[in-house]
Image: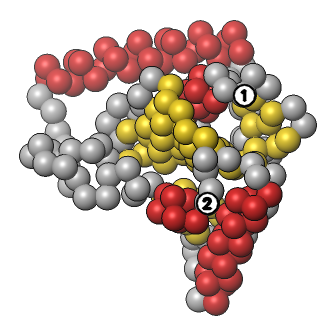
Amino acid sequence: MAKYFDRQKLDIVIAASKEIVQKRNEVLKQTGIDILDTDAISSAFIFEIVSQYDSDYNINFARNGEDAKSKDVLIEQKATRVAGAMTKTGRPRKGAGTDAAFQFHAMGDLDSPRYIFVARDKETLELLRVYDISSAANQAKVLNHLQAEKAAWLAKGFQKRDIILLTEKFILNNLDLPHRQQIGNCVILRD
């Protein structure tokens, strides 16, 4: 579907793009990090929330390797964008709050001692929900689910994309996450 703008809207987009690129270049020069790279902004926002309850938490801005760590524990971190609670017509959206799906590469390393899953608002990019999983029982449930998804993917034969999913519904229905807190508009559930 094509989307063309009139000159006034194009000027808005161009001006904002110039501001964003200027800020990106400043940050790149100061830190060596391109904030426009995949996951960089998301990781920074996640850090703002998680570091408030885990003072040892830190993020890895490198493209490969672990996503984060806390002390010596490596963390696999996944974020996805979800639609808001209301439809465009102002009605409550079905599945809101339970419809995030976190992507993994079937042929990637699925095992992690700690997982952090984050649902972000599709429109505002605000963090809505954080699932922080580190207990052995919950970690095993996540890994078993991912391995079953991988086996199902492999059973289908060669596929160009190796994406498997862990859904928010799986997390809510199968994991014990007794610790609940809210930071700003973000709800954190953890074990």
| Camera sees residue 40 | no
Could you tell me which secondary element the residue under label 1 belongs to? loop
Mark 1 and mark 2 in contact? Answer it, CB < 8 Å.
Answer: no
Q: Who is closer to the viewer here, 179 or 171?
A: 179
Q: Is residue 23 left or right of residue 176?
A: left
Quadrant in the picture for the N terminus: bottom left
From the image, tell me which residue sits under label 2.
175
Up the image or down, 67 lies above or below 8; here it is below
Residue 164 found in image quarter: bottom right
Furthest toward the right, the residue is: 72
Camera-side mark, 1 or 2? 2
Q: Is residue 61 left or right of residue 25?
A: right
Q: Amino acid at mark 1?
A: Asp
Location of residue 151 in the rendering, given as x and y in whole percent from the top left corner: 68, 83
| Measured Cα–Cα span from mark 1 to mark 2 | 20 Å
Location of residue 173 in the rendering, given as x and y in whole percent from the top left corner: 51, 64
For the residue carrying disc 1, how many other residues have a C-alpha within 10 Å: few (<14), some (14-19), or many (20+)? Answer: few
Mark sitting on residue 190: none
Location of residue 104 in the rendering, given as x and y in whole percent from the top left corner: 63, 61
Rendered residue at 9%/46% (across/down): 89
Q: Who is closer to the viewer here, 126 or 30?
A: 126
Rendered residue at 27%/44% (across/down): 85
Could you tell me which secondary element the residue under label 2 belongs to? loop
Q: Amino acid at mark 2?
A: Leu
Tell me which numbered mark, 1 or 2, is placed earlier along the sequence.
1
For the residue carrying disc 2, how many other residues have a C-alpha within 10 Å: few (<14), some (14-19), or many (20+)? Answer: some
From the image, tell me which residue sits under label 1.
54
Rendered residue at 73%/41% (across/down): 67
| Camera sees residue 117 | yes
Rendered residue at 32%/52% (across/down): 96
Up the image or down, 114 lies above or below 186; here it is below
